[in-house]
Image: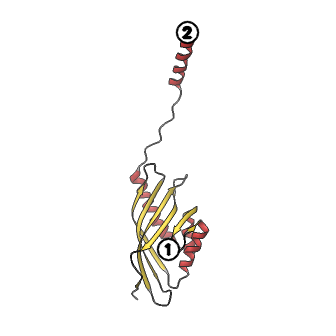
Amino acid sequence: MRVLFGVALLSLMALACAPTAEAPPPIDLEAERASLLQTDASWFEAYSASDSPADVFAAQVVADASLLPPGAPLAVGREAIREAIAALEEIPEFSVTWAPASAEVADAGDLGYTVGAYEMRMAPEGSPIEIVGKYLTVWKKQPDGSWMVVVDMFNADGPPAAADG
């Protein structure tokens, strides 16, 4: 009995002295939201300044991301998304602007989303039109701390309108 008591006491002492894993530092959700807003805004800046906007768009998505464009099939995967954006870019006089209005980040800090507005202009049949809408983009935090798109979805607020000038 003494032997069992001694073994139990030594085991408890060893456990008490064993190093404990440090708790991860708390996640600063405000900083993560700000980072996500900046990432979304920077994505548009890079896209709009590029000679290859479809490539820039696709570079910001994970390999198996999904794009849910209005009135078009689901595009899954970086290459399918690049092709969908390239098809938009081929429409005569196509241009787009977008800006995030808000961002949220999960408590774990690994997923987040941005909500924003966009404006597209184009002249598919020679007459300029404008499409105003909103978007939702779901982001995943990468091991290096960057944010990448996992799902992007956008839709119009109403039917296309004749564009000024």
Which element carries disc 2, helix, strand or loop? loop
Viewer can see residue 51 = no
Residue 21 in percent (x, y) is at 51, 35
Residue at 48 percent across and 61 percent down: it is 138
Along the horizontal axis of the image, is 14 left or right of 113?
right
Residue at 50 percent across and 86 percent down: it is 124
Q: Amino acid at mark 1?
A: Ser
Q: Residues within 10 Å of mark 2 (few under 14, many from 20)?
A: few
Q: Quadrant of the C terminus?
A: bottom left
Residue 149 in percent (x, y) is at 51, 62
Residue 121 in percent (x, y) is at 45, 81
**111 or 21, nearer to the observer:** 111
Q: Quadrant of the N terminus?
A: top right
- Check contact, mark 1 vs mark 2: CB within 8 A: no
Name the residue tied to disc 1.
Answer: 48
The answer to whether 11 is drawn above or below residue 30 in the figure is above
Q: Which mark is residue 1?
A: 2
Viewer can see residue 21 = yes
Residue lying at the far right of the rendered structure: 79
**10 or 72, nearer to the observer:** 72
Q: Amino acid at mark 2?
A: Met
